[in-house]
Amino acid sequence: MGRQNGPIILHNAYLLTRALIIVVMCRTAVFFGEELARYGFGQSHPFNSDRLNAFWSKFKELDLQNSGQIEVEHPEIADAETLHQFHDRTYIDFVRHASKLGTGFLDFGDTPAFLGAFEASSYVVGTSLRALNLVIDRIDGIQHAFNPIGGLHHARRGYAGGFCIFNDIGVVIMEARKKYGIERILYVDIDAHHGDGVFYEFENDPLLFIADIHEDGHYLYPGTGSENETGIGNAKGTKLNLPLGPRSNDNDFIATFRKVESFIENIAKPELIILQCGADGIRGDPITHLEYTSKAHRYAADALHRLSHIYCDGRIIALGGGGYNQKNIAEGWIAVVSSFIKAPK
């Protein structure tokens, strides 16, 4: 009997060891700190510090910080030279000056200046860069990372837009290439708003693959991201815009996201994945018209998590993006983090 059970015991031990290795591989960094809460435009504005607190309250309620798979990390700040990798120096100086005054707008009326805006924005960028470093360098075994206040996808090189002052995504892309030599980068954006600040700044970049699911621009800011926008020049075909009509639901999202999966498998084949997981597509958001639930976020995160382990050794960074209903923010972002700490499906 003992001799018959031996191979079974050894096989079970092998499976257990393999499962433990996968669990270790799925360690995830989650960033939290009052420095990130500084990025907000006042309590009467949709983008305020309560957004971060809503996520963190749910995170603690579920006791995720003690799951054994999550490392809670502190925010870090980026300096002006780092910002200059993506942004024009004159714009950086303009934000610095407006930040000291705390009045006026940083764009044409959507993004107000506030006291300390420069430092708050620099913390968002620095934290997303820290996420990149953790994931690429495998510090403490971390392969995945989540910055809840990252994903400021409307900021352009020379101006702000849509509540976004500095574009942390753009800086991360530039840093990944400069510091780590990573060429094929996939950016997936499921925020209800089209990520114009990333799309148009990299529209002619053939190695920056973009898949953006958003509410049709006929109904929502910034009014861009039509299906026929697929990149220009040598980059044509490396971008995927997938607009959805108002009241689109989970089934519509999942059917559309399968096109993203095919795009990744047949075209992108990335070395790094960046996910902007804005929660403003979830039903009940005050400024959009989509009707997802957090199941959409879980589906997207599960699919990208799985594909990250196939193509880029698990290297995936998630950035919170938009979302202005606190319950939706908590549920959408928790769905992403919960996916990352499970074995990929």
Image (spheres, rainbow, N blue to C red):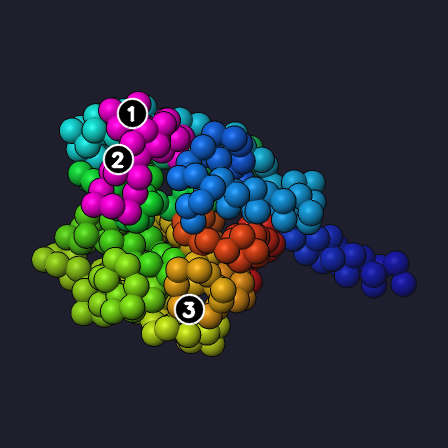
Residue 23 visible in image: no
Specify the amino acid type for callout 1: Leu
Disc number for residue 104: 2
* Helix, strand or loop status at disc 2: loop
Q: Is residue 286 left or right of residue 293?
A: left
Magenta span: 97-124
Q: What residue did someone put label 1 on?
A: 101
> Compared to 95, does 172 lie above or below?
below
The Cα–Cα distance between marks 2 and 3, rounded to whole angstroms, is 31 Å
Asked if residue 110 lies in the magenta stretch, the reply is yes
Q: Residue 290: which disc?
A: 3
Q: Where is residue 245 in the image (x, y as percent from the top left)?
A: 34, 74
**Mark seen at residue 262:** none
Q: Which of 53 and 149 is in front in this view?
A: 53
Q: Which amino acid does label 2 sit on?
A: Gly
Instruction: Please determine whether, in this image, residue 71 is positioned above or below residue 231.
Output: above
Q: Toward which corner of the image does residue 179 lie, by quadrant?
A: top left
Along the viewing direction, whichever of 329 and 102 lies nearer the viewer? 102
